[in-house]
Image (tube, rainbow, N blue to C red):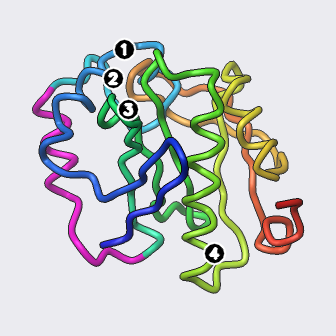
Amino acid sequence: MSAMLETARLILREPRMSDAEAIATWLNDFGVSGNLARVPYPYRLADARGWLRTRRPGMAPGETNFAIELAGEGCIGAVGFHQGVKGTVIGYWLGRPFWGQGIMTEAAGMALDWFFERTDAQRVISGVFAFNAASLAVQKKLGFIETGRSRLHCLARAADLEHIDTELTRSAWTAREQ
């Protein structure tokens, strides 16, 4: 990926090894990692470096991740895509000091624009653990709808948890008010 996406306050860009310390700092907060399926807790610098080594230029849109950079703060989170059993999944996280400011809605919206412009995918799937009302609110603002409930393993909590499954269709994304 060589894409860089910008708004007045955010830059979405390719994650780089120099982000490792910030990533480890933000994800070593159980309030963040405990909301995510695939992130362990504690989260160490070695974990961040290991993940960053999996990122390669030119990855397919369905495997692309963006670092979220806020002016004056550096990397404060990430948003990206991976292939799940039922299709392309969007996932995201944000350091706790940046919650409640509309940053994730803005960042995920930019990433979804980018993804739908570069693929012919008809939908993106996601979801949240049932206790994560804030993340569900982000998804609803973006047009995701609930499609069911499931159980999903959370590495940080070492448990299978109730998960609210969601999806966003291309038609819903293109029909939204700009």
**In percent of the image, x 66 and y 63: which residue is there?**
124
Q: Quick one: label 4 or label 3, which is nearer the N terminus?
A: 3
Q: Residue furthest front?
A: 8
Q: Is residue 166 above or below residue 122?
A: above
Please, what is the three-letter code of the amino acid marked with disc 3? Ile
**In percent of the image, x 77 and y 32: which residue is there?**
137
How many residues crowd mark 4 within 10 Å: few (<14), some (14–19), many (20+)?
Answer: some
Q: Quick one: label 2 or label 3, which is nearer the N terminus?
A: 2
Q: Position of residue 117 (x, y in %)?
A: 61, 79
- Mark 2, mark 3: which one is toward the viewer? 3
Q: Is residue 3 magenta?
A: no
Q: Quadrant of residue 105?
A: top right
How many residues crowd mark 3 within 10 Å: few (<14), some (14–19), many (20+)?
Answer: many
Q: Quadrant of residue 95?
A: top left
Label 1 residue SS: loop
Q: Quick one: label 1 or label 3, which is nearer the N terminus?
A: 1
Q: Which mark is residue 116?
A: 4
Please, what is the three-letter code of the amino acid marked with disc 2? Trp
Q: Which mark is residue 29?
A: 1
Residues under numbered marks 2 and 3 in contact, where contact means CB atoms less than 8 Å apart? yes
Please, what is the three-letter code of the amino acid marked with disc 4? Phe
Q: Position of residue 157 (x, y in %)?
A: 44, 18
Please, what is the three-letter code of the amino acid marked with disc 1? Asp
Label 2 residue SS: helix
Residues under numbered marks 2 and 4 in contact, where contact means CB atoms less than 8 Å apart? no
Quarter the N terminus occupies: bottom left
Residue under pointer 2: 26
Magenta-drawn segment: 45-60
Q: Which mark is residue 76?
A: 3
Q: Which mark is residue 16?
A: none
